[in-house]
Amino acid sequence: MIGFVRPRIMEMDDQKVKIRIRLRRRTRNHLGSMYFGALAVGADLAGAIHSVYFTGGKGMSMSFKSMHAEFYKRAEGDVFFESCNGFFIQEIIEESRKSGERSNQIVEVSATNISGELVAHFKMEISIKMKSSAQNPQR
């Protein structure tokens, strides 16, 4: 699904990520706005990409436990998904690494159009489990 909508990372650092999904034939519904599924992909990526950024994807199990979405207007053009949860993600990765247990955190993602108007807001509960150093020895 991610490859189908062809998202692009526009900017990323330790705290913030901004992803763009273009409104095109594959992402446009019968009303001329972005499909809910394409919006969900953008929110998923923006909310979760820091977990891969900080771990390299190694020794980690990540999933979403819940998602709450509010839609304010139709996304009738390209949409930018922005998350400023990098430090929270880093904290739960370390918490899970120390405890060996799954850690959860609510992350928020805002979706705006090209004019900067808010089209949707997502609150998702991310769940991360890191293998402890005893489970994942260095080779």
Image (spheres, helix red, strand yellow):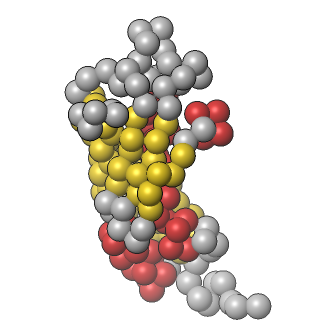
Residue in the picture at 28% in, 33% down: 115
* 123 on left or right of 46: left
Measuring 40% from the left and 25% from the top, which residue is drawn there? 77
Residue in front for this viewpoint, 128 or 87: 87
Indicate the quadrant where residue 55 lies.
Answer: bottom right
Is residue 97 or residue 33 the one in the foreground? 33
Q: Is residue 70 visible?
A: no
Pick whichever, 26 or 137, lies toward us.
Answer: 26
Q: Nearer the viewer, residue 81 or 95?
A: 81
Is 72 left or right of 93, judged from the image as shown? left
Residue lying at the far right in this picture: please name it: 139
Q: Which quarter of the rendering shows the C terminus?
A: bottom right
Q: Position of residue 48 (x, y in %)?
A: 46, 56
Give x and y (percent) for residue 13.
42, 68
Task: Relative to 112, say whether 44 is above or below.
Answer: below
From this view, report whether residue 73 is shown above or below residue 4. Answer: above
Identity of the residue drawn at 61% across and 90% down: 134
Q: Quadrant of the N terminus?
A: top right
- Residue 67's place in the image compared with 29, above or below, is below
From this viewpoint, is residue 109 visible?
yes
State the image coordinates of residue 89 (x, y, percent, origin top left). Answer: 39, 68
Q: Is 14 drawn above or below residue 83 in the view shown?
A: below
Residue at the extreme front of the image, as rendered: 115
Tag count = 0
User: Which quadrant of the structure image shows residue 7?
Assistant: top right
Instruction: Point out residue 135 in the picture as x, y percentages from the top left corner.
Output: 64, 84
